[in-house]
């Protein structure tokens, strides 16, 4: 499944979201902004509801705004409060998470078999 919004700028597809093969999660590429929030919500709704962790591959994500950061954080707060594993997140996202969700912990993960695309950050909501 691949979701993408109507392009909002010439030669720019905006946000493209696909399901990750072989694990529960999403691959985000392009720009995650207000114009792509509906696409992100639809992709998140396609994820199984009862999984303990959700992987988000962000290696091709150029930028993310507050709107889409809040959408991603909503995943960590939905029952059963899965941990989010952000693969190669933009530095701006880790800052936004600290500002928007001080109840969420962020723990860096070193590259290895569980982090095939390099560095990762694990997000867990309190409670």
Image (tube, rainbow, N blue to C red):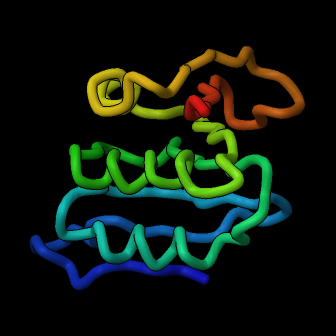
- Quarter of the image that includes the C terminus: top right
In this view, the residue in front, 60 or 52, is 52
Front-lying residue, 41 or 119: 41
Name which residue lies at 48% across and 68% down.
17
Work out which quarter of the rendered image holds the N terminus and state it.
Answer: bottom right
Q: Quadrant of residue 121?
A: top right
- Left or right: residue 59 versus residue 62 is right
- Judge by depth and name the residue closer to the eye, 72 or 88: 72
Residue at the far left in the pictured view:
9
Q: Is residue 49 left or right of residue 52?
A: left
State the image coordinates of residue 104 (x, y, percent, origin top left).
50, 27
Query: Residue at position x 65%, y 38% from top?
Result: 85
Q: Residue at 20% of width from left, 79% of height from top?
A: 7
Quarter-wise, where is residue 96 in the image? top left
- Position above or below: 5 against 31: below
Percent across and percent down for residue 11 are 19, 71
- What residue is rendered at 62% in x and 16% in y? 107
Q: Is residue 95 left or right of residue 126?
A: left
Q: Residue furthest front?
A: 127
| Residue at the outermost right position | 113
Q: Is residue 16 above or below residue 111?
A: below
* Residue 34 screen position, x and y as percent: 18, 62
Q: Quadrant of residue 105?
A: top right
Rendered view: 103 above or below 19 = above
Q: Is residue 41 above or below residue 95?
A: below
Tag count: 0
Q: Position of residue 44 (x, y in %)?
A: 53, 68
């Amino acid at each position: 499944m691949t979701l993408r919004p109507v392009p909002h700028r010439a030669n720019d597809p905006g946000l493209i979201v696909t399901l990750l093969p072989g694990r529960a999660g999403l691959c985000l590429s392009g720009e995650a902004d207000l114009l792509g929030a509906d696409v992100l919500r639809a992709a998140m709704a396609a994820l199984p509801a009862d999984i303990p962790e959700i992987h988000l591959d962000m290696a091709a994500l150029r930028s993310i705004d507050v709107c889409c950061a809040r959408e991603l954080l909503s995943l960590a707060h939905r029952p059963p409060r899965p941990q989010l594993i952000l693969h190669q997140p933009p530095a701006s996202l880790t800052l936004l998470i600290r500002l928007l969700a001080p109840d969420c912990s962020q723990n860096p993960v070193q590259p290895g078999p569980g982090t095939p695309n390099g560095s990762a950050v694990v997000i867990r909501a309190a409670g």
